[in-house]
Amino acid sequence: MTRNALVVRGGWEGHHPVEATDLFIPFLERSGFRVRVEGSNEVYADPDVMAETHLVLQSVTMSEISREAFQGLRSAVEGGTGLAGWHGGIADSYRNSSDYLQLVGGQFATHPSKHPDQCGGDESDNFLPYTVELTALGREHEITAGLDDFELHTEQYWVLHDDLIDVLATTTHPVQPYHPWHRPITSPAVWTRHWGRGRIFVATPGHSLDVLRDENVSRIIERGILWAAATESE
């Protein structure tokens, strides 16, 4: 049976929502999905579209969501539609909706920068070398099994989260003399979440196309997409 994937993209252009999702649309099609692409999250408010959607792949950084659109998305997920995404396209979406933040389970707070003396005023000020470390669960989970810890040089997301997420990988923000915190802070970097009969997958790496092309990141996202598309049994 052909499954339907709804790709919703837009919001802040700095995360290249069109080009980024275009990287994974061929994978969706090879995996047997019929893909529909929308540039507005108002499609979530269409009950006919959502009833036929098995997976939502979202890349909408910041922006806003109407109550009707959010209710359509949440109802679809509760009914078994998967929700997947990366970086700000899912973890920094719709700051106007606390209900959305609850649905996803983790929210971008910041990405620490280099030493002030090394900052030049562009996005690379926030590019740091860091390690994505698999958790014990992550070493067994189908999304991340067989992978090892790996290094990235990009934005390192500091995420506020709750205990209902299942963390597959983390990243730790070190203590630096030019930052105000006083001990290392560990944030989830890859997580899953069960909501009703639906599954939610989030990966925080993915600021730029080169990061999304990283072998480890792309593999995690592809596996996460397939995992999210599998409906929980009643």
Image: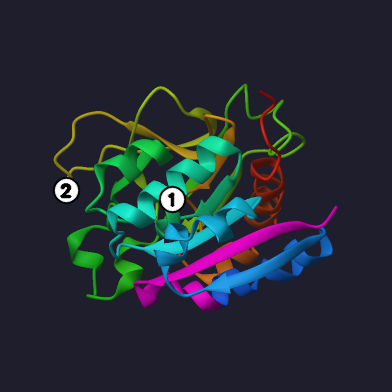
> Which residue is at 18% across, 61% downward?
116
| Mark seen at residue 178 | 2
In the depicted structure, whether residue 8 falls above or below residue 200: below
Q: Judge the density around disc 2: few (<14), some (14-19), many (≥20) Cα neighbours within 10 Å.
A: few
Tell me if I can see residue 41 in this picture. no
Q: Amino acid at mark 2?
A: Tyr
Residue 92, by quadrant, is: bottom left
Q: Nearer the viewer, residue 26 or 41?
A: 41
Residue on which the image places disc 1: 72
Residue 2 position (above or below residue 229) = below
Residue at the spot 19% in from the left edge and 65% down from the top edge: 117
Mark closest to the chain's N terminus, 1 or 2:
1
Q: On the rendered structure, is 3 left or right of 169?
A: right
Q: Which sits in the foreground, 106 or 189? A: 106
Q: Amino acid at mark 1?
A: Gly
Please state which of the two labelled residues, at mark 1 or mark 2, is closer to the viewer.
1
Q: Which mark is residue 111?
A: none
Q: What residue sits 40% from the left and 58% below the top?
A: 88
Q: Quadrant of the C terminus?
A: top right
Residue 208: % across, % down = 49, 69
Residue 78 or residue 141, whichever sits in front = 78
Q: Which residues are magenta?
A: 1-18
Question: Circle 1 — which element?
Answer: helix
